[in-house]
Image (tube, rainbow, N blue to C red):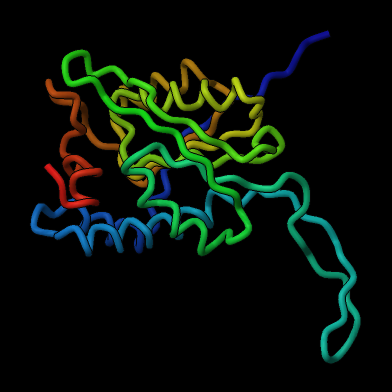
């Protein structure tokens, strides 16, 4: 008997409003305040697409006029897991759309010499293994941090994971899809390449520094 395995897909969400706000974020003259606001707004807009396939069920309700069979989200609950620190900027936008979602945190930083991710923090809701997880990180550069974060979630029993990024490079998307073919990737823009410092080109710079006004 053949075993059917779900394969992840790359979804590019190029809605005009997202593209417009992303252009403003890319501009080097956009300050931290506006950068934060734009990231939150884009995250909410992307959230509509990411939650498009949530299962629904019929429920009986009564409006002020009549009784009816209406639709309600069913099945697993959701969790939002940002990769620190830049992923924090995506949480509020998603929570405005899914206010009952639980929030976990994964701390990874990129080693300045090897450019490889290093774990320093991980804290999850106790029932994370029974939730659909939206893993949030604005930049998908080498793919190392995202791939490691997905592995950390899988070790905690997570079986339904969606990776949500703002800007990506082909190298990063390829790595994640090879190492985690069961995870869908949702991204607003796929840029050209990585430079020698492993930054996305043209990208938008260091999302964490621009988000928090650091260097």
Q: In which quarter of the image is the N terminus?
A: top right
- 64 vs 122, nearest the viewer: 122
Residue 175 on image: x %, y %: 39, 19
Left or right: where does residue 75 sit relative to residue 189?
right
Residue 70 on image: x %, y %: 82, 69
- 113 vs 10, nearest the viewer: 113
- 211 vs 26, nearest the viewer: 211
104 to 150, vertically: above or below: below
**Quadrant housing residue 63:** bottom right
- 8 vs 159, nearest the viewer: 159
**Quadrant housing residue 41:** bottom left
Residue at figure coordinates x 36%, y 47% from the top left: 188
Residue 171 in view:
yes
Residue at figure coordinates x 27%, y 55% from the top left: 22
Residue 11 in view:
no
State the residue lying farthest toward the left.
29
Residue 96 on image: x %, y %: 51, 64
Residue at figure coordinates x 53%, y 52% from the top left: 49
State the residue lying farthest toward the bottom.
65
Q: Quadrant of the C terminus?
A: top left
Residue at figure coordinates x 41%, y 43% from the top left: 12
Q: How many marks?
A: 0
Residue 117 on image: x %, y %: 32, 21
């Amino acid at each position: 008997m053949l075993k059917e395995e779900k394969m992840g897909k790359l979804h590019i969400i190029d809605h005009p409003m997202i593209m417009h706000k992303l252009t403003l974020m890319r501009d080097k003259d956009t300050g931290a305040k506006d950068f934060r606001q734009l990231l939150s707004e884009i995250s909410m807009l992307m959230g509509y697409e990411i939650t498009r396939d949530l299962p629904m069920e019929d429920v009986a309700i009564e409006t002020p006029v009549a009784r009816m069979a209406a639709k309600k989200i069913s099945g697993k609950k959701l969790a939002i897991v940002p990769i620190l620190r830049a992923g924090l900027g995506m949480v509020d936008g998603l929570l405005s759309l899914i206010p009952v979602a639980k929030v976990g945190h994964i701390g990874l930083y990129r080693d300045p010499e090897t450019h490889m991710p290093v774990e320093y923090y991980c804290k999850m809701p106790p029932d994370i293994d029974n939730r659909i997880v939206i893993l949030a990180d604005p930049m998908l550069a080498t793919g190392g941090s995202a791939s490691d974060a997905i592995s950390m979630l899988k070790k905690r029993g997570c079986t339904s994971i969606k990776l949500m990024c703002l800007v990506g490079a082909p190298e990063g998307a390829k790595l994640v899809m090879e190492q985690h073919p069961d995870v869908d990737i949702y991204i607003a823009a796929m840029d050209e390449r990585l430079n020698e410092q492993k930054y996305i080109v043209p990208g938008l710079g260091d999302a964490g520094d621009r988000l928090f006004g650091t260097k």
